Amino acid sequence: MGEKLLEVQGLKTWFHTDAGLSKAVNDVSFFVEKGKTLGIVGESGCGKSITSLSIMGLVQTPPGEIAGGKILFEGEDLLEKTEEEMRSIRGKKIAMIFQEPMTSLNPVFTIGQQLIETLMLHENLTKQQAREKGIEMLKLVKIPLAEKRFDEYPHQLSGGMRQRVMIAMALCCSPKLLICDEPTTALDVTIQAQILELINELKEQTGTSVMMITHDLGVIAEVADDVMVMYAGKVVEHATCDQIFEKPMHPYTYGLMNCIPKLDDDDTKELSVIEGMVPSFDDMPKGCAFCPRCPEAMDICREKMPKLSEAEGRMVRCFKYTEEWEESSHE
Amino acid sequence: MLSYTAKRLGQTVFVLIGISLITFVLLQVVPGDPVALMLEKRADPETIAKIRHELGLDLPYHIQYYNFLKGAVRLDFGTSYFTKEVVSVALIRSFKVTVKLACMAFVFAAAIGIPCGIFSAVKRGKRIDSVVMVLSIIGVSAPAFWFAIILQIIFGLKLDILPISGFDGVSCYILPSVALGARYAGSMARITRTSMLEVMGQDYIRTAKAKGASRWSVIMKHALKNAMIPIVTLIGTDFGYMLTGSMLIEKVFSIPGIGKLAVDAMSNRDLPLLEGTVMYIAFVFVIVNLIVDLSYAFLDPRIRYGKGAA
């Protein structure tokens, strides 16, 4: 096992809403190794984006609150840092790419101004040096006519180009960890592949660790070393990428797998879906959060929440792989 | 950008012609004969007819309009029926007073309103936000003349530190500008807050935070520049209103500005003066709107380049 760059222990990020307490991230633990890519998968609202915002220290408080846990980055707890210290980490050591390239760049500043801003914030550069470095970064992310693009405004670029700019901005201070929150969701399929390839390539070059947040298993297959599947604010399965694709163990994980249509499927076969919806926070089942949608749910699943425990060399949160399942099914 | 400006200027000409026509028609329609008012019912019909002839009021309407337009192009609206002052001279005299008042009131309103709006947006939901918003409602809804009188009582009579009327020195303008600016300060604070709140929720603000930008830079640089467009629209129109004079404020403080000129012209049916004043007001609004539109292009590159490419 490699060195842990980031280790999240028992993270709880809760939101105080008018409708009550929403436990968006509820006791989540994981780690990211140096130079590796961790994929985080789950449906909308499962807490994956909130997890990343918690790491960045960008959760709005109030209504949000980090109710517990530790976020150890290079051995230091980010939750203990002051805002000032966090600012010098954000953009410098931990950078982030967002889902919406169309709206994530500030429309009234040029690409160059936005790149230079990041560089000037964290590196001791003159404006001229920052400009050169910025153009170099645009070339690195394969933006044609980088010098010209540098002085253009975001609306003059296509979505794919803007996402490249976001990547350039994120990587310009050589961060140790790059958090990508659905970086390709808003892009065309062909552009998606290019962006993923670019992220992979840059990761190889710079040795940056990546946290890839997505709901798309195709993206995971492309880039991830390890995969963590989240459901309703909890981790339900955590394994290597090979393990997950070879044999998904949690019913939710293989539900997700089945949702991907295959080319050799019979034409008449209906697309498979996971029935139902993610339960809302004020309607959480007593037992396993997934049991209302789980085809294999037993009585025990409705009564208590299974623990995340080791099974077949990975972590999975399901009674199926515990002794209790056997007992329950014999009854 | 150049073609955009030219196009806007072209539109301006048509707007002014339209306004001149409407003004002319309305002034013919409103009841009250200026000549009768001038002579105060003492004159016999012959004298009235004679004076009407001298003033050109017996000509067919289209000739009268043509004469008015011909004069207006040269900024010559004739002379006042009552004071016999040349209208453009009277306008310039009043404008000099009003422009001082308007500029001071505007600076006061913007200097108070915009920072309060930003502050309020940043402290959204906190007690101080509510305090600022309540004050802004009071500012917007309190009648200006009432506020003016309160100011006169406090600063003029009780504390005796500022003059309560006149228009000689800068000090004379302080109370009128505050009284005039208060409601604009209120509305500016409200629009600034709304606009800032909308912008603060945008994705690019999150990006700026994720870069490690300071709170100050996020608010004053990334957010404010985007929030400025609706603010500029409002403050442009506000400035237009201030430049066209406030009758009430001018009355309370005895300031002979455009507002007073307009009221006098109206109550006397002083057609040349009225036409001149209305055209002045129309012109101010047209120019202010033009400047506002051009400033969008300055603030928003999407407009600047979009129009340039088209």
Image (spheres, rainbow, N blue to C red):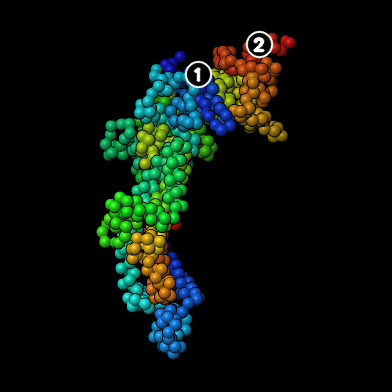
Question: Which sits in the foreground, B261 or A199?
Answer: B261
Is disc 2 on the same chain as disc 1?
Answer: yes
Please name the residue that numbered disc 2 is placed on.
Answer: A324
What amino acid does circle 1 point to?
A: Gly
Q: Residues within 10 Å of mark 1 (few under 14, many from 20)?
A: some
Find the residue positioned furthest to the bottom.
Answer: B46
Task: Specify whether residue A109 is in view.
Answer: no
Please name the residue that numbered disc 1 is placed on.
Answer: A10
- Identify the residue at image location x=45%, y=85%: B58
> Disc 2 is attached to a residue of which chain?
A
Residue B199 location, quadrant: top left
- What secondary structure is found at the residue carrying circle 2? helix
Residue A311, image x and y in percent?
Answer: 58, 13
Vertical placement of A176 versus B205: above or below?
Answer: above
Residue B57 location, quadrant: bottom left
- Identify the residue at image location x=47%, y=34%: A98
Find the residue positioned furthest to the front.
Answer: B158
> Disc 1 is attached to a residue of which chain?
A
Residue A21, image x and y in percent?
Answer: 56, 27
Q: Residues within 10 Å of mark 2 (few under 14, many from 20)?
A: few
Residue A43 location, quadrant: top right
Question: Which sits in the foreground, A250 or A269?
Answer: A250
Q: Is residue A154 left or right of residue B89?
A: right
Vertical placement of B282 versus A101: above or below?
Answer: below
Q: Is residue A121 left or right of residue A287?
A: left
